Amino acid sequence: MVSIAQRLMAAPVFSQVYERAWRPLFTRGFSLGGSGTADYDRALRARLAQPGDRHVLDIACGPGNYSGDASKGLTGDGRYVGVDFSASMLAQAARDNRGSRVTYVRGDAHKLPFPDDSFDTVLCLAALYLIPDPLPVLDEMMRVCAPGGEVIVFTSVEASIAALPGARQVAGLSGLRIFGRDELLMRFSRLGAVHLEQTITGVGQYIHAHKASEPPHA
Ligand SMILES: C[S@@+](CC[C@H](N)C(=O)[O-])C[C@H]1O[C@@H](n2cnc3c(N)ncnc32)[C@H](O)[C@@H]1O
């Protein structure tokens, strides 16, 4: 069944208001009205903008609202690729967030159309909680990440408010999933991720991990 949230993402009018109106509001909601998510997000954008010859993959990129920052510092052969399965989000991205090093590709996060080990930075921001079968997306993130590369996720997390009776059901009805505190960390660690860091901002969490430079011993 297609959830309310999934229908919203596919609606052309939603992609038009997403970047400037919806995303900032939603970011604030994740901090429970505080500024934790916005502060982390600002630091993340500054990090992504640092100079480097990197290949960056933004999974479920929406209207490309990170492409400006993530492609700003790219040097040499550096590329930013945004992938999303919504045609209207990608059309918006192509209108608002173009760049000479930026490419948008239509695809499903569960089956990324890229070879193993092909990106230095792999992002999945504000999307995992919308995806009905989200954990295999982490497998794909790690698969396409190059050894020594980094993966960064921003999504929901169970906090005291989200643990209130009924909160999971309300989230479930809208199609938003709330992850347990260790759920994603455990999956990443099983996938051999190293230097795992989790930062919780209200009902949001950022996970930053690396793919080991050497494959783990069998
Ligand atoms: C809320 S937007 C996030 C946009 C952007 N990453 C951000 O941080 O604001 C979620 C995006 O996930 C995309 N999406 C949902 N499921 C997907 C899937 N299975 N494969 C690719 N994209 C997907 C939607 O089309 C939508 O553009």
Image: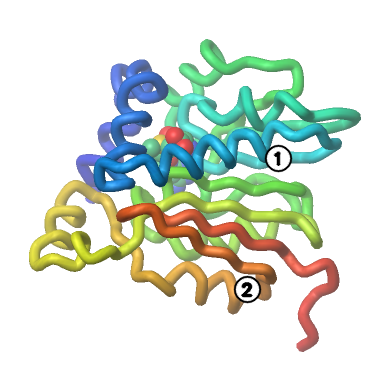
Q: Percent position (x, y) of residue 216?
A: 77, 80
The local secondary structure at tag 2 comes to loop
Give the image quadrant in which the ligand numbered 1 is located: top left
From the viewer's perspective, is 183 left or right of 9? right
- Identify which residue is drawn at 37% across, 40% down: 35
Check residue 56 in the rendering and tell me which mark sits there, or answer none.
Answer: 1
Q: Is residue 126 above or below residue 183?
A: above
Q: Circles 2 and 1: CB distance less than 8 Å?
A: no
Which residue is outermost to the right? 76
Q: CA distance from mark 2 to mark 1?
A: 20 Å
The local secondary structure at tag 1 comes to strand
Amino acid at the residue labelled 2: Leu
Q: Is residue 92 above or below residue 75?
A: above
- Identify which residue is drawn at 39% across, 53% down: 201
Amino acid at the residue labelled 1: Val
Which residue is outermost to the left? 166
Q: Percent position (x, y) of residue 217?
A: 79, 85
- Identify which residue is drawn at 64% across, 62% down: 209
Which residue is outermost to the top? 95
According to the picture, the residue beneath numbered tag 2 turns out to be: 191
